[in-house]
Structures are given as structure tokens and as C-alpha cells.
Amino acid sequence: MSTVARTDASEIAVHWKEEEYIQPSARFIGQANLTDPGVVERFTEEKFPECFREYADLLTWDEYWHTTLDTSRPPFWKWFVGGRLNASYNCVDRHLAAHKNKAALIFVPEAETEPAHALTYQELYTRVNEVAAVLRDFCGLTAGDRVTIHMPMILELPITMLACARLGIIHSVVFGGFSGEAAGLRAADSDSRVMIYADAYYRNGKLIDHKANADIAVRTAEGEGQRIEKVLVWRRHPGQDLTNAAMVPGRDYYMDDLLKGYRRVKVAPVSVESEHPLFLMYTSGSTGKPKGCQHRTGGYLAYVTGTAKYYQDLHPEDVYWCMADIGWITGHSYIVYGPLALGATSVIFEGVPNYPDAGRPWRIAEQLDVNIFHTSPTAIRMLRKAGPDEPAKYAYRFKHMTTVGEPIEPEAWRWYHEVVGKGEAVIVDTWWQTETGGFLITTKPALDPMKAGSAGPPALGIFPVIYDENGKEIPGGSGKAGNICIRNPWPSIMQTIWKDDDRFVRQYYAKYCRNPKSTDWRDWPYFAADGAVLAPDGYYRILGRVDDVINVAGHRIGTKEVESACLTVPQVAEAAVVPVVDEIRGRMPTIYVSLKPGVADPQKVSEQIVATVETIIGKIARPKGVHIVPDLPKTRSGKIMRRILAAISNRMDTGDVTTLANPEIVEQIRKQVQGEGPVEMQEGPEDVKHFGEQE
Ligand code: WT7
């Protein structure tokens, strides 16, 4: 793996060379949405916040808004105040006049024997209406209610989301790969009384029985005091029974059965205020409980539509494929809402990229003539490893590619550019977060040159700053890293953490707020919890998380969530989870535990820990290793020193350990993990170096 920039300027020269600029092709520029360099002038700080009218005007408003930004109650910003709109109308109905026969979504099943299926805007309209009728008339749901959707990548997922949006119901989609327990906890947190599932789906050549998770989720939610009245179950093959889990009478309903009663029913889109919440998306933070990031309708939709148009260069005639999962923010913003608001064609792929082989994505690209492709560094590394020469075998041609989710090493970037993009596609490396709703740092594809490994300049209307721990600005070109913050609000910043305004303020604003009484947005920088360095040319290079969150394959896993899962194994006394560098997945959690006295079979406990983590959180959190150790290194006040364990797991210098309560344990653990002989020490990436530092 390549190295990441260091905090110390003298080291940067050694470990990180400035990459060269690569210019977009004339062919790309010739057709791009955003080619006017004057756009930068339209989005300067003097033009803020009015500049975002340009994005809002991409939408159809039932009632036009009067105030762009209301800062009267910081940091609970309000955008496009006075406006009313409906997200489902904007993503579906308004395209019927010009594009009703155009594919809105193309579903690609995992099995290559099952044909791809295109859904036109007209068909999408019909299906969204029918599902909305079920939600309204059968479930009795109305605007403001929450519904938890735990579904895989099938067409019915975006259809269900849009049906919720049509009624102003706040959807909370939980990634299909998460466990039933994880879904149940999220359903309880959002007070959902309806959950929506699929019975089964294909993954890695296997049919996964997903309905079983619904039963676990309902039980978990009820354990938290939240009764789930109804579970709606989409069938992967309507009419066929694919699940072994029984349908609970009076609670579970197959959607294909229910829909028979709602054929051709039309449901008028419910016009909601700009600030009406559109959805919740749970994400891991630095304390155990996942945070329900609450996103608004107007500002969110305007921002993702504008950024999909300018940075992804979506045109209605493009075929766009984002290989992420809709269960993450990437999928919400850049598979569903942004592309559909633009009337584009968005591909939904059920399977995994390397099944049955690493040529699969490129066969899909060739078959559907995909010309815009979007994926993560993890997928890029994996496909590069499994089939470096595969892309050349297929006759697709990308004009544009995106990478998102974690820092990408220049080597992986170059393979993406030269081999996947055939040296022709322009690349945007987009930095953002679940909380931010849309891209915050990225090159403008036809206007800015690319630089491997750098996300690039700020997105239009976004004014970042890098602060040190004391709130002093670290200037560009200093070679020093610090905490990247955004000085200003923007339309798709989350509204709050669901039911937890205090935690929202604490997590994102308390650290650098200059004056809690001020209603001037300039006093409220947004703290992103990522490290970054700013090059002299104004390009940002993102170094990774500064809090105790592990970025696994581009997704945040909370350390404390994994630790509390470990502690449910009865033999475990204490647990500490740290990131370890992984060639493909970027980082993976590694678990250190000490056991209660008298445990006979530690090997069995290890296996139990792995199984438990998979059950409680999901396979995404599967540890790279489990180390059963006699004790964990602790400070004199009893805090577990995760930083030291991270150093051991990554063969980095553990630093001074003499002030610990039990310094001798460090060497003992080191020998256990690294072996007796001498080991070559590594410099280690920035996020691992500083892991758990605030403890
Ligand atoms: C974290 C957010 C944003 C959608 C997917 C992940 C890391 C994201 C980049 C990038 C370097 C990146 C950051 C960020 N990250 N994009 N282009 N370069 N790092 O959403 O799960 O909320 O994670 O992913 O560390 O804070 P998320």
C-alpha cells in the first residue's frame, strides 16, 4: 500500500510525492454539463448563500421559497424556507411528459442467466403509486411517520423509498447486509411501527434467506419497547416461497399479495415543507449507539441534484452505474435521488463485483453501454487484484468515473484511470459523509485537472478550513495535517441526529464553535472528524478518520459497537477493537479480549466472538483477527489504550508506555501478536497512528 501524508513537513518529502496533474480529454469537455469557468465566480463566499438558488432551481417547487438560509437557531440551519415540494414528484412524475418511455432504473440480477430488467419512468410512476397506496391505506401511515426498510439491492427498494417520499413518510433504510438485530435497534430508535423486507436475494451465487432477519428485528425492536405492527415482505420472485421463515399471521404480509388490491391506484404526492425530513440514515459515531442522521427534503434534494449534474455529469441520455449499495448514503444520494431528479438512467446491481469472476462489472458495462461508473477504492483494489487485465477484454467506454468512501492510493487510482477508464474517462474523487448528504470536495470534471490520491478543491459553495486541536488554522502548503472543517452551512447538511439535538451539537459543532450565542454561521464551523492536508494548489488530501471509527471498505464501523457485541459473549471480560490495515478493505477491525477466569477453550471463544459480531452487526464488521490476551494495556485511571493495540497490530512504534498501569503487558501482547523474533517496524497511516487518541 502506498503511504499517506504525514503531519511532519519533513517527512512528506520522503513518503508522499506530489502527483502530476492529468487533464480531462477534449472529448469529455465537449459534452460536459459544467464547462463555464465563470461558475466559480457565481459561488464565491460573497455570493453565499444565494448561490445555491442555482441548485434549487433544478427542482420543481409546489410553492417557491422566500428565504435561502435561516440561521436564527444555530446550528439548526433551515434552507429554502417557505418552499413546498415533493421528492417523489421531482424524481418521477415530472419526467413523464418528456421521458416516460425512458429507463429510469435498470435492474441487473446477480445470476447472468436472469435477464436485466429496465423500468421506464412510466412504470416507476405506476409502481410507486401502488406502493404508496399500500402504505397509506393498508398501513395507515401518514407524513412524518417513520418506516424502517431493510432490503437488498432490488428494484423494490427505490420504489419503496419513493413511495414513502410521496407521502412524506420518513424512510430509514438499513443496509441489507446488516443483521436483523442491527435493523431492529434502528427501527426502535426511529419509532417505526412498520418494517419492510425482502424474502431473499442472491449474493455470491447463493440465495440468502433475508426474511429470517425480519423476525430477529421485530424481536429486537420489541425488546427496546417498540412494537412492530406490520412487516411487509417483497418477494424476490413474486408468487414463489423462497424463505424458510414462517409468515406471522396478522403481522407479516407479502407485497405481491397486498398489491393485488391496489392496482392502478394513484396517490397524489403530498406537498411538504422544504424542511420536512426526507429520511434517516444511521451511521456510526464515536460512542456506541448509531446516530440517525436526519436529512431534509428541499435542501438535500437540491444539493444532490446539482452535484450529480455538475460533478457526475449526468445527462438524461447517459447510462449511469453506481456500484454502491442503496443502503448507504452514496446510494440514496447518487443512485436514487440525484440521478432520478435529473431524469437519468440509474443501474441497480444485485450482486457482488467479483462473482462469478472479476470480469462481471465490465460485462455489465458492455451489455448496458454504461458510460458513467461510480465505485469505491475497496472495489477498485479488489478488482485490480482479482483481474487486472479484465477491463481490456470488454468493449465498454466510460466517459466519467467516481471514487468515494476512503482515501485512494495513487497506484490504485492509476489502475482505475488507465485500465478501467482506458485512459479516457475523467475521474472525480469525491469526499463527503453520511452527515453531509452530498459531495463536499471534488474536482469539477471538465474544469479542474485530476491529481491521483487528492480529492481536489472544495465543491462549489463549500468553504473548508483545516484547524489544529486548538482551533488555529493550518494554512495550505504548510505540509501539516489537521482536522478538516466546513466553515459554512450548505443545503444538504443533516438537520440533526434523530431525537438527539444535543448530541448533534456536541459531535459536529461544539469543538470549534466560536460563540454559542452567535447566530452568524461564521461562528459555527462543522467538524467532520477527518484529518486532511491542503496542498499549495488548493487540493485537499484526506487522511481518514480522527475519531475512534474504523472505515471498513468505505463504511464507518463504530469501535464501541463492535466492543459491546464482544461483551455479549459470556466468557469475555474486556474487549478493545482497533483498525488494522488491509490490502483490499482499507481497514478492518481487529479484536483484543481478556477472558474471565477459568475459561477452558479460548479457541472456541474466538470463534464465538466472530460469530457474535456477525450476528449483532453484520458481516461488514467481521474482524481480521481475534487476540485473546491476559490483560489489556490501561492507563492508571483504568482506560484501555487502544492506540497501543493499534500500533502492535500494524507493526508500528508503540511509543512511551511507561506511564501505563501495566506497562509489562505491552511487550507480552506484542510477542503474542508479532512473534518472538525481530519485526520490521512500519510508519503506519495517519488514522491508525492517532487512533483512540482522545481517550
Ligand atoms: C467517511 C464517511 C460518503 C459516502 C461513503 C461513506 C471517508 C469518504 C472519501 C474520499 C477519502 C473518504 C471519510 C469520511 N471518505 N469519501 N473521497 N477520500 N476519504 O460515507 O460511511 O459516512 O463515511 O468516509 O473518512 O469521513 P460514511
Image (cartoon, grey):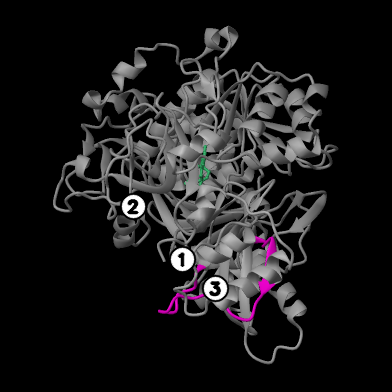
The residue labelled by disc 2 is 508
Q: Is residue 547 above or below residue 90?
A: below
Give the magenta range: 621-641
Amino acid type indicated by mark 1? Lys
- Which amino acid does the dot numbered 2 rest on? Tyr
Q: x%, y% of residue 141?
A: 45, 56
> Which residue appears farthest toward the bottom when viewing the image?
598
**Residue 137 visible within the image:** no
**Of label 2 and label 1, which has the lower sequence position?**
1
**Which structural element holds mark 1?**
loop
**x 63%, y 68%: residue:** 591
Which residue lies under the disc numbered 3?
Answer: 564
How far is mark 3 from mark 1, CA to CA?
Answer: 10 Å
Q: Residues within 10 Å of mark 1 (few under 14, many from 20)?
A: some
Q: Amino acid at mark 3?
A: Ser
Measuring 41% from the left and 57% from the top, which residue is drawn there? Answer: 145
Percent of width and height locating residue 221 = 52, 71
Q: Which mark is residue 289?
A: 1
